[in-house]
Amino acid sequence: MTIKMIAVDMDGTFLNSEKKYNVARFNTLFSRLKEKDIKFVVASGNQYFQLRSFFPDTYQDITFVAENGANIVMGDTPFYNAELDDDTIQQTLTIVEELEPTNLIVCGKNSAYISEQTSRRRMGN
């Protein structure tokens, strides 16, 4: 059986409790993976740009399955990005706002958005 891919979760698996990993050791192993044409995949609920920041020298050769699979990027090349239509987004936000969250952050492909209403509630206004 030939290994073709290694996929890792980040938080609590690949990263230690300080959100770090042994970069030198990884780079050595990563070079060996590339020599054997074994793909390295990072899978996480975190945003792509946050995940990419952990691999500043090697991200071009890594596939990222970010935001729980909603955004898949191969190095710098977008592969898949889930999209919701505007009506679904508005309906979902209406339901979530009724729950009066302390804070609400909605992540998109290029940025994150914070609700003005929940920010005011948190600040006591």
Image (cartoon, grey):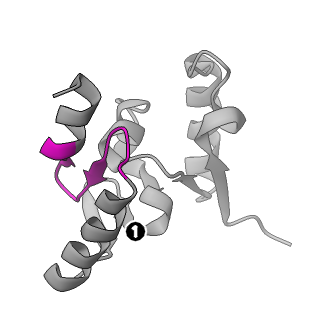
Determine the residue located farthest toward the front in the rendered image.
Answer: 125
- Residue drawn at (62%, 58%), measured in percent from left and top? 38
Quarter where residue 121 is shown? top left
Q: Amino acid at mark 1?
A: Ala
Label 1 Cα neighbours within 10 Å, binned few <14 / some 14-19 / many ≥20: some
Q: Is residue 26 magenta?
A: no
Residue 107 forms part of the magenta stretch = yes
Given residues 51 and 5, the one toward you in this image is 51
Q: Quadrant of residue 66?
A: bottom left
- Percent across and percent down for residue 101 are 38, 46
Front residue (pair 7, 33): 7
Question: Residue at the location (56% across, 22% down)?
Answer: 19
User: In the rendered structure, which segment of residues is drawn in magenta?
Assistant: 100-117
> Residue at 39% of width from left, 65% of height from top?
72
| Secondary element at tag 1 | loop
- Picture coordinates of residue 109, whole percent (x, y): 22, 59
Q: Is residue 34 above or below residue 21?
A: below
The answer to which of 97 and 111 lies nearer the viewer is 97
> Which image quarter is the N terminus in?
bottom right
Residue 81 in sight from this viewpoint:
yes
Q: For mark 1, what is the residue?
A: 70
Q: Residue at x 22, y 24 (%)?
A: 123
Q: Quadrant of the C terminus?
A: top left
**Is residue 24 toward the left or the right of residue 84 in the image?**
right
Query: Residue 67: where, in percent of width, then height?
Result: 43, 57
Residue 37 coordinates in the image, percent (x, y): 58, 59
Counting every numbered tag in the picture gives 1
Against 71, residue 114 (above or below) is: above
Is any atom of residue 66 visible in this view? no
Relative to 3, say whether 59 is above or below. Answer: above
